[in-house]
Amino acid sequence: MTIPQSFIQELLSRVDVVEIVGRYVPLKKGGANFMGLCPFHGEKSPSFSVSPSKQFYHCFGCGKNGNAIGFLMEHAGMGFVEAVQDLAQQVGLQVPDDDVSPQERERAAAQRQRQATLTDVLEKAATAYRQHLRHSPRAVEYFKGRGLSGEIAKRYGLGYAPEGWRSLASVFPQYDDPLLAESGLVIVNEEDGKRYDRFRDRVMFPIRNVKGECIGFGGRVLGDDKPKYLNSPETPVFHKGRELYGLFEARTAIREQGCVLVTEGYMDVVALAQLGFPNAVASLGTACTADHVAKLFRFTETVIFSFDGDAAGRRAARKALEGALPYASDTRSVKFLFLPAEHDPDSFVRAHGSDAFARYIADAMPLSRFLIEIASEQCDLGTPEGRAHMASNARHLWEPLPDGALKRQLLGELAGLAQLDPRDLADIWTQGAARDAARSRHGAAPPAAEVPPGGGAPHGMPGHGGARPPRRASRGEASRAPAWAGTQRNTRSAPSGRADHAARLLLSHMGFLDELSHEDHNVLCAQEAPHGPLFAWIEGQFHEHGAQPWAVLRESLRGHACEALAERVMTGSHAQTEGDTQELRVELRGLLNRMLAEQLRQQETQALAEASTDPAALQRYRALQARRVALEKLAHVQA
């Protein structure tokens, strides 16, 4: 989906970053800005600043910064297009797409409206289930028996679906409304058309997307009925292969603790939150997919999968490994935690304590070791045949890894186990990939033993650039998001000079341009590149669009020659230009006076050089010197 840059600018000019951030972070007025605890790293005193004039946020502690779109991507884990659509819906704008027809746009708008309606219906049901819980001693006793407090139940919105076939009829008077079936709350009998509630006599776990909207439910029986757990079906708003239970509730804890713990069930998540591990999520009755892993890596660089130590747990871990391989870059960590077969995370912590579970987490198996274990299963590495079998198994696990140090080190380790030179092993795998490609061209499937775990064609041999994740970001996400989404900078900014600071003040308070003289504008635009062209660009934007906040200017600069300079001067702790507006005007005036004095000094030198041949040049020199001295005195007083 290609979203025009002009629309992004229009959108950012209409939304209020303070309002957007304030929905997720408690903010308090502090001078010209709003301050709060940074949602991207743990801290006890507020260092997170949101500027209403710049329409930008910045953390002095971790360096995260960005606009409203960037905040939704960084904090809520949305993709670029999703964040734009979310903000556009809030301000009543229709997101344009140059690549689609008007009919497709209309269908997309209708689908978004339908999804919003479905989440409203599901939220209404969630409210009813929470109310039913208060009046069901048996359900309350079940949660208490699992050690849950009222606070945890409230945080996760736990509820209860009463006995009876049509209890939702008291919540939705129009029980035959098609939305109830479409949302998965009601089942319609195909034979006689009769309707009844999907969830009956179950404790309920609402499932929320990263925006906090209710998109489905998980229900657990209180007795021994089957199935023990029941999920909402696939609907227009609920897709098990992409959603994770508890991610919305855990997102802040994930960032604070620097990792996410992926478990297998709802109760694991809420029980671990109760026991001091609020950074846990769970897959929804399905294997962990590549989409799950990609979503988790929006929130953290470390993912730890927790599985039972039995055969089923090992199978689930292998599926998770396959989903994680394309994302296991050199800067990301994927680990696997295996509990004793008789325990799940909840029971283990209750039996052995939080400290013991924390040690298990710390000692979790790295992806590299688990990959080697999986490749070596049922292979006798004491024989050439066993080593060859291991190497064949390893190829399809190694190939999806992104090219980098990890992938190359693993090639060396696997080659060592196979007792081969790494180059020889790479050659063998390259030949195997060529054979698979030839079979594919001729319509023949690879031998069963050589089918890649993910079902995809082999790729990523040395020199081929590595593997790409199975899901590619849309053009909008891939090309636009990284430039402004608000990331921490590891490189130090260049020293801030007068031109830097003047640019910073004007980019932050564009309205100051209206108060400058023609001489001031000339001085600014005469600065050496890239500063002079940047000042000329700012002036042009001001004449064309009026005063705009930095968030909008940042988008307008995309692809411009001055983009790097503007981003540099507006990034980092030195970039904060908030305060009393009149004081900032005086500060800019002082900078301009010094810059003008410097220009006059250069003109003096030129006039003095011309004095030997031009009698009037000496008089010009004296006039220039007098004015420069006066400006320097004024600048000194202002300083």
Image (cartoon, rainbow, N blue to C red):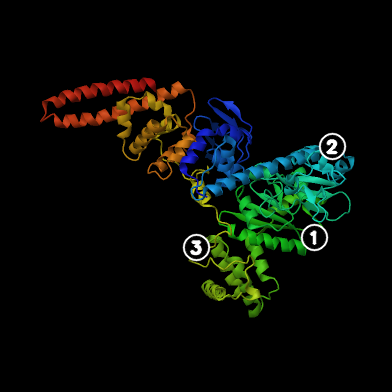
Could you say which is closer to the camera, residue 86 or residue 589?
Answer: 86
Q: Which residue is situated farthest in the front direction here? A: 192
Q: Residue at x 50, y 46 (%)?
A: 3
Q: Is residue 261 above or below residue 341?
A: above
Q: Residues within 10 Å of mark 2 (few under 14, many from 20)?
A: few
Q: Is residue 585 left or right of residue 160?
A: left
Mark toward the viewer: 3 or 1: 3
511 relative to 287 in the view: left or right: left
Q: Which mark is residue 134?
A: 2
What's the mark number on residue 465? 3
Q: CA distance from mark 3 to mark 1?
A: 40 Å
**Tag 3: amino acid:** Gly
SS state under label 1: loop
User: Callout 3: 10 Å neighbours few (<14), some, many (20+)?
Assistant: few
- Of 576 and 430, which appears nearest the observer? 430
Q: Which mark is residue 341?
A: 1
Whole-percent x, y for residue 477 in the image: 53, 49
**What secondary structure is marked by label 3?**
loop
- Above/below status of 139 relative to 639: below
